[in-house]
Image (cartoon, rainbow, N blue to C red):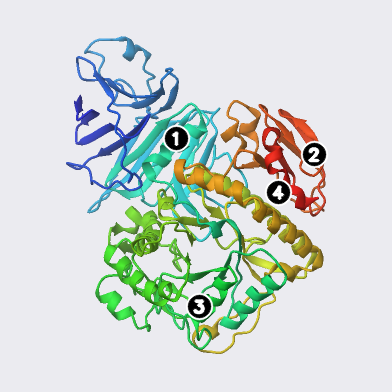
Amino acid sequence: MLFEKEHCLCLRNGNELLQVEPWGKNSFRVRSTKYPQYTGNNNALTEPVNHQYGSVTISSDQQSGEIINGKLIAKIDQFKNLSFFNQNGKELLRGYQRNRIADMSAGVDSEKVNHFNSALNIDSREFIPKIGADYELKIRFEANPKEKLFGMGQYQQDFLNLKSAHLELAHRNSQASVPFVLSSQGYGFLWNNPAIGDVSFAKNMTLWHARSTKEMDYWITAGDTPREIEEQYADVTGKVPMMPDYGMGYWQCKLRYRTQEELLAAAREFKRRDLPISVIVIDYFHWPKSGEYTFDKKYWPNPSGMIKELHQMGIKLMVSVWPTVDQTSSHYAEMKEKGYLVQVERGVPITMDFLGNNGFVDFTNPAARKYLWKLLKKNYSDQGVDLFWLDEAEPEYTIYDFDNYRYYRGSDLQVGNLYPVKYSQMVYDGQKAAGKRKIINLVRSAWAGSQKFGALVWSGDIDSSFRSLRNQLAIGLNMGIAGIPWWTTDIGGFHGGIDDDPHFRELVIRWFEFATFCPVMRMHGDREPHTKPLSNIGGGKMPSGGDTEPWAYGDKALAIMRKYMTLRANLKPYITEQMKAAHEKGTPVIRPLFYDFPEDKVAWNIEDEYLFGPNILVAPVLYSQEERKTQHIYLPAGTDWVNPYTGAKLAGGQTISFTPNLSQLPLFIRKSEYQSLRSAFNILN
C-alpha cells in the first residue's frame, strides 16, 4: 500500500519500506529497507538543504501515487515499480521490472492492459538475504540506448561517455569511485551507498550492486542543463573551500627528496633560474619508520629552519603522510589497544607489508582521527608545514580482500568507500580548528563528499605513456562531473619515464602543456635511473627516482616549460575566478564541451577536448609525433573563437585542422573574452 508521511511518498510492500523524500531543489532521496527503520546514515548527503515539500497524490485504492518536487516527478505504479519524469512529462529513469500480472480476477483496468507481461520474474529492487548477515542489493533501471553518461570518478580508461561501461564501486591505487553520474537525458544520480560493489551501464539495463548493505539509498535530481544538475548536486554534498593563492601556481614534486639539503638545493635552483614555483613536496619515508609521523632527524635535522627559508623564497611546503603504522613503531601498541587500526576478520592483522609489517589507521573512528591529527600538528604543522599529501588513501591493501577488513563504522564491504572521505576530514577538521580557512590537501582517493574537506585528488601511480595521458584527460573531466573540482595528475606519469630518452621528453612536454590547464599543475614521477639508498636505517633505506625538475629534460624542454609555467602565472586572475565558481557553486574547473554548450549536439560527442573555465578551449596533444601529426578540433557553436597563436577569428560549429609543433598546445579563446586574456597568452608567441 502507498501512503504519505511527513511530505514523503511511502510504500509498504510486505517487509519492504520504501520512501521517496524531497531532498533539495528538484531532487529526491530514495530509500528502501527490509529492517523496521532506516539506518539514519546520510553518507554523502551531509549538507543542510531547504526541503521544498512535494505535492503527494495517492490513488483511492492506495495502489499508485506520485510526488512532485519542482522539475522532478516520482511515480510508483500498482506493480510497485518506481519511475521518474521531468516537469514536461519526459521519462528520465524507470525501474527495470520483468514480471506479469498474477491475478486478473480483480478486474481489468487500463494500466493492467498496458502492462508489459514477462515470465522472467525480475524486480527492480532485489534484496538478497545473507544468512547471519545483512543483504546483497541489486537495483535495476531500464536502459536508454540514446543516453550518454558522465562522472563516476576516476577509472583508468580513455573514454568519457560511460554508457556500456562496467565499473567497480571500490577504491584502488589509481581508481577512485565517486558514484555520481550525469545523464544527457537531464538528470543526475548519486548512489548514496559506500558499500563495495559495481555498476553496469549496459545496453539492456543499468544495474547498481552492493555486496553487503542494510538499505537502498540513492539521490536523483533533474535540471534543464548540466550546470543546473551539477550545482544541485553540490548543494547537497558540499563544495570545496576557496583555493589558496599558492595552490594555483606550479607544484614541484619527485620520488623523493631524500634530505633537507636536496630539497633546499632544488628550491634555490628554481629561484636562481627565475622559474615560477608555489609549492615543493617532501614525499614518503622522510620519517624514521611508518607510524612515527615525524621527520627523520638524521636527514631532516632542522625542519623549522628549512621551512623558514622556503617561505622566504615564497614557496609553501607539502609533506607526505601515510596511514600505515609499523608493528615496531612507538605508537602501534597504543593504537591497536584503543581500536584505532583497521581490523581483519581472519588471519594476522597486517594489512600492508612495505618495509615492515603495517596496519592502517581506521579513519572512520573519530577518536583515531583526533589521535593522529595531534601527532601531525605537533610534528608538522607546528613546525610550519603548510599542507599535507594524504597518500595510500584507498587504502592500498597489499591484498584487496574487501571481505576481510572491518572498520569502526562497519565491515569494509558495507562502508569501505568512506575511508578516503574520513582521511581528508581528519586533516581538514584539524586545520580548521587551528584557524585555517583556505584548506587544500593532496589525496590519492575520494568518494562523494570528499570535496568539502579540501580534497585535491590526483590520479595515482600511473604509467608514463601517451596511452596513460589519454586516460588522464577522461579521468579529469569525469572527476569534475562527479563533483570533485580539484584534480591533478603526475606530469609525465609516475612509472617508467627516463629523463634523457627523447620519446619520454616529448611525452613530458605534452603532459606539461596539458597540466598548465588542469586545476592544479603538479610535477611528479618515479623517473629512471634510480639512486641507491643512503643507508640501511630509517628514511635512508629508500632509494630515490631520477630528477623531475624542468631543467632535467634538456634545454629545449626547459624553454618550453618555462613558457607554460609563466603562462600559468599570467592566468592567475582567470584561475581565481574559476576557483571561486567551484567554491560557491560546485562548478568543475575543467569540463567537457557540453557543460557550457548543452544545445550543441556535437559537443556531447567530443572526448578529446575540454574547457578550462568558460572561455578557454584546450585540445591537448594525446599522441606522439610518430602516431599522429594533424589534429581535428571541433569549435562549439554559439560563439566565435580566436586562435591565440595567430589571432585568427574562427566561427563556432565547425571542425578545423591544427598541426601543432612541440611548443604549441592547441588553444582557442572565446572571441568575446579574447582581449581580456590576450596579454596572458603573449608568452607563447
Looking at the rendered structure, the secondary structure element under dot 3 is loop
Instruction: In the rendered structure, find residue 680 and report the number of the disc placed on it.
Output: 4
In the rendered structure, the answer to whether residue 445 lies left or right of residue 214 reads: right
Alpha carbon distance from label 3 to label 4: 39 Å
Question: Which residue is the site of mark 1?
Answer: 188
Alpha carbon distance from label 1 to label 4: 36 Å
Q: Nearer the viewer, residue 609 or 411?
A: 609
**What amino acid does circle 4 point to?**
Ala
- Earlier in the chain: of badge 3 and badge 1, it is 1
Question: Which residue is the site of mark 3?
Answer: 285
Looking at the rendered structure, the secondary structure element under dot 2 is loop
Residue 645 percent across, percent down from the top left: 80, 44
- Earlier in the chain: of badge 4 and badge 2, it is 2
**Label 2 environment density (alpha carbons within 10 Å; few <14, some 14–19, many ≥20):** some
Q: Is residue 411 above or below residue 367?
A: above
Residue 180 percent across, percent down from the top left: 45, 42
